[in-house]
Image (tube, rainbow, N blue to C red):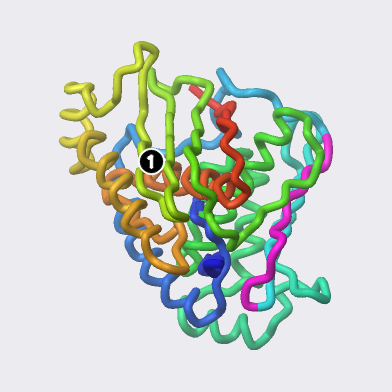
Amino acid sequence: MKKNRFITGVAVLAFSTLMLGACGSDNKDSANSSSSEASSAQSSTAESKTTESSKEVVAGGKLQDGTYKLEEKNYSNGYRAVFEMIVKDGKITESNFDYVNEDGKSKTEDADYNKNMEAKSGTSPEKFIPELNEQFVTVQNAGDVEVVTGATHSSESFQNYAQQLIQAAQAGNTETIEINNGGDLQDGTYKLEEKNYSNGYRVQFELTVADGKITASNFDYIDADGKSKQDDTQYNENMKAKSGTEPKTYIPELNDELVRVMSEDDASPADVEVVTGATHSSHSFIMYAQQLVNAAENGNTETIEVDNIVTK
């Protein structure tokens, strides 16, 4: 069994894999958040994020009213994640994400943990957990939740779990989602694909696991003809000029980095570095990678179909 890295341990959009303890998490979160901030400042218009509150939804399944729950099965450093999302009139009205111990007490109430993390990374569970929950209700979209500086891993794990709850709400499935966090990866091929095209492209993602390790990662954006965004010369040229990178560079980089990162013990997709100039795509990659890792932990090879929300 590999350790889960939720606090540090998203990824995040860990995307996967999810929780760590205070000291390890503080150092990792601080280092990764610096990279994320640098990337964010240079991201292109094509990669920028928009909120549901300011854009018209043109594709994506509507959320069915109800209470949707997700929980980790296993404790890591004394805590596990629990998440409840309430939908009313098709909107997310409450987000209740937390880490709880065996007594059901929240990590936000762990004074020593909060003090130590605050000193090392500039934030703490009592700060970043409410912030993530508030963001989610505001933006109504997992991928638009901003990574909290100093809590990168937890932010990306939040994105991953929020996305899984959205998918459940779109299907109206109120059965509690159980995450076998820290479970050994089962050999097989795991697939995820977006249902809807955004700016002419949608995500297709395939992970191959052999001997308990990810041996191949094939993430890409494809158009209606099945052609990759990496082959779109004009798109690549325009994005390169604006942000310093382009799909034919950052897509292979993300795929290679995931395989490298996951070859290590105690690994998580949230350890994948955000690519400067492709912040949003990097976080989407991490979020989806985490979801595929969750599937591999359960040995579930059924293709995950994401009824992704598209706005204009």
What's the residue at 64%, 42% (across, down)? 164
Total labels: the figure holds 1
Check the image and report above or below for 207 versus 104.
above
Residue 79 seen: yes
Check disc 1: other Cα within 10 Å, few if <14, some if 14-19, many if 20+: many
Left/right of residue 264 with respect to residue 104 in the rendered view: left
Please provide percent x and percent y for residue 255. Answer: 32, 45
Q: Is residue 68 magenta?
A: yes
Who is closer to the viewer here, 172 or 137?
172
What's the residue at 59%, 45% (across, down)? 299
Please provide percent x and percent y for residue 192. Answer: 51, 33
Q: Is residue 185 magenta?
A: no
Please provide percent x and percent y for residue 276. Answer: 27, 51
* Residue at disc 1, secondary structure: helix
Left/right of residue 69 with respect to residue 8 in the rendered view: right
Disc 1 marks which residue?
A: 281
Q: Amino acid at mark 1?
A: Ser
Left/right of residue 254 with respect to residue 133 in the rendered view: left
Q: Quadrant of residue 72?
A: bottom right
What's the residue at 62%, 69% (across, down)? 127
Tell me where the magenta segment starts and ends, as one range. 66-77
Residue 7 seen: no
Who is closer to the viewer here, 147 or 209?
209
Check the image and report above or below for 219 versus 267.
above
Left/right of residue 254 with respect to residue 189 in the rendered view: left
What's the residue at 43%, 36% (across, down)? 206
Q: Quadrant of the N terminus?
A: bottom right
